[in-house]
Image: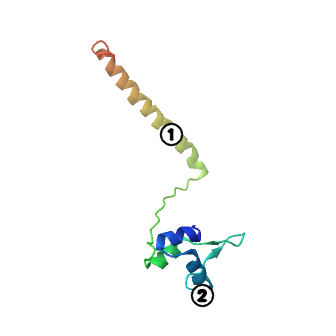
């Protein structure tokens, strides 16, 4: 949402011109609760002669039943244990190089 001054700067027109366009119906402004004019991004694109780009929205949803709840918890536990094991193995492997590491 932009006020008429901001839109006017973007398109190179004055606020008065935008008010006239609103009265004539060329570009109809939206009104706030305090009756102030404002314009949307789509209206800005309409004025400059561009179309709004339609985007596709892709979503993923997984529905689990009550019986699968315990399985999900065990999967989380297994994942955490594998992460801990991975990092602890790395630390254990570095112990033999402890004396060779240079401290800053």
Residue at x-position 70% and y-position 73%: 35
In the displayed orientation, state which residue is furthest to the right: 34
Q: Is residue 92 above or below residue 71?
A: above
Screen quadrant of the C terminus: top left
Along the viewing direction, whichever of 96 and 85 lies nearer the viewer: 96
Residue at x-position 59% and y-position 86%: 25
Residue 21 at x, y percent in the picture: 57, 83
Q: Earlier in the sequence, mark 2 or mark 1?
A: 2
Residue at x-position 50% and y-position 39%: 76
Residue 12 at x, y percent in the picture: 47, 74
Along the viewing direction, whichever of 74 and 91 lies nearer the viewer: 91
Which of the 4 image quarters holds residue 89?
A: top left
> How dense is the environment of label 1, judged by Cα within 10 Å: few (below 14), some, or many (20 and up)?
few
Query: Circle 2 sits on which residue?
Result: 24
Residue 20 at x, y percent in the picture: 59, 83
Mark 1 element type: helix
Along the viewing direction, whichever of 14 and 38 lies nearer the viewer: 14
Mark 2 element type: helix
Along the viewing direction, whichever of 60 and 15 lies nearer the viewer: 15
Is residue 8 rendered to the left or right of residue 91?
A: right
Query: Circle 1 sits on which residue?
Result: 76
In the displayed orientation, state which residue is furthest to the bottom: 24
Q: Is residue 63 above or below residue 40?
A: above
Separation of residues labelled 2 and 1 (CA atoms): 62 Å
Q: Is residue 96 above or below residue 4?
A: above
Residue 8 at x, y percent in the picture: 52, 72
Which of the 4 image quarters holds residue 97?
A: top left
């Amino acid at each position: 949402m932009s006020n008429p001054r901001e839109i006017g700067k973007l398109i190179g027109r004055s606020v008065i011109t935008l008010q006239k366009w609103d009265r004539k119906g060329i570009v109809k402004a939206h009104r706030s609760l305090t009756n102030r004019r404002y314009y949307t991004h789509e209206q800005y694109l309409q004025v400059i002669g561009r179309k709004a780009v339609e985007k596709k929205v892709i979503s993923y949803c997984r529905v689990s039943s009550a019986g699968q709840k315990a399985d999900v918890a065990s999967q989380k536990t297994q994942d955490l244990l594998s992460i801990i094991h991975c990092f602890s193995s790395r630390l254990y492997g570095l112990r033999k190089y402890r004396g060779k590491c240079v401290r800053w």
